[in-house]
Amino acid sequence: MVEAAKESDWGSTQREDLEALESEQAFRRRFGFTVNREQRRKTLEFKHDKDLTDPEIRRLRWSGSLDLRSEPARILASSFVQGFGYAMIALVCLQMLLGILAVARADSLTVPSLIAVTIIEAFLVCMLASAYYVYVEPSQIHQRIHKSGK
């Protein structure tokens, strides 16, 4: 019973890979971007060789860290970029803390000022998430691949 499930999953994965390789639209639905057939092949090989998930491939591509021009495909992420991301996150956190302290120390609070601070804090949260996804996460994926020896 377990063997049949494993074979069924593997067959399904092979069908999805073949469909993504052959069809630009299927590849786009699966990974969220469109490339030529050669780059689709490189993406699928890279995904399986490095044991990555479809969302990880999407994130690497979105962050500009997936190099499909080289043979084989590779991740363009470094410790320096990751450090820059952490520094950016620290600065944004500091800015958020200053905004919260300004509200806490205010003599009188008005609804418009609270709305303004809330909007600014929400924007800073978006900056935090962006810094993480663009600078930190690709390096973490790269480090995980390196540690696994793939």
Image (tube, rainbow, N blue to C red):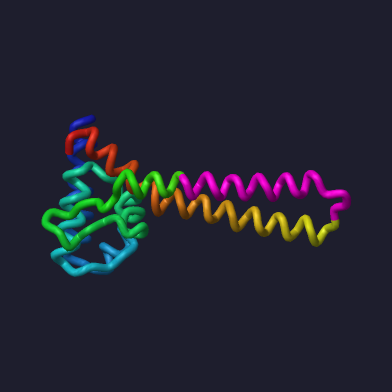
- The residue drawn where x is 32% and y is 59% is 64
| Image vertical order of residue 21 relative to residue 129, above or below | below
Predominant secondary structure, magenta span: helix
- The residue drawn where x is 62% and y is 50% is 95
Q: Is residue 33 left or right of residue 45?
A: right
Q: Is residue 38 left or right of residue 102?
A: left
Q: Is residue 95 magenta?
A: yes
Quadrant placement of the C terminus: top left
- The residue drawn where x is 19% and y is 69% is 36
| Image vertical order of residue 83 relative to residue 122, above or below | above
Residue 46 place in picture, x, y as percent:
18, 50
In this orientation, which residue lies closer to the viewer: 55 or 135?
A: 135
Query: What's drawn in magenta, residue-wise?
Result: 87-109
In this orientation, which residue lies closer to the viewer: 24 or 126?
A: 126
Q: Is residue 68 magenta?
A: no
- The residue drawn where x is 11% and y is 57% is 71
In the rendered image, is residue 42 in sight?
yes
Residue 107 place in picture, x, y as percent:
87, 49
Q: Residue furthest top?
A: 2
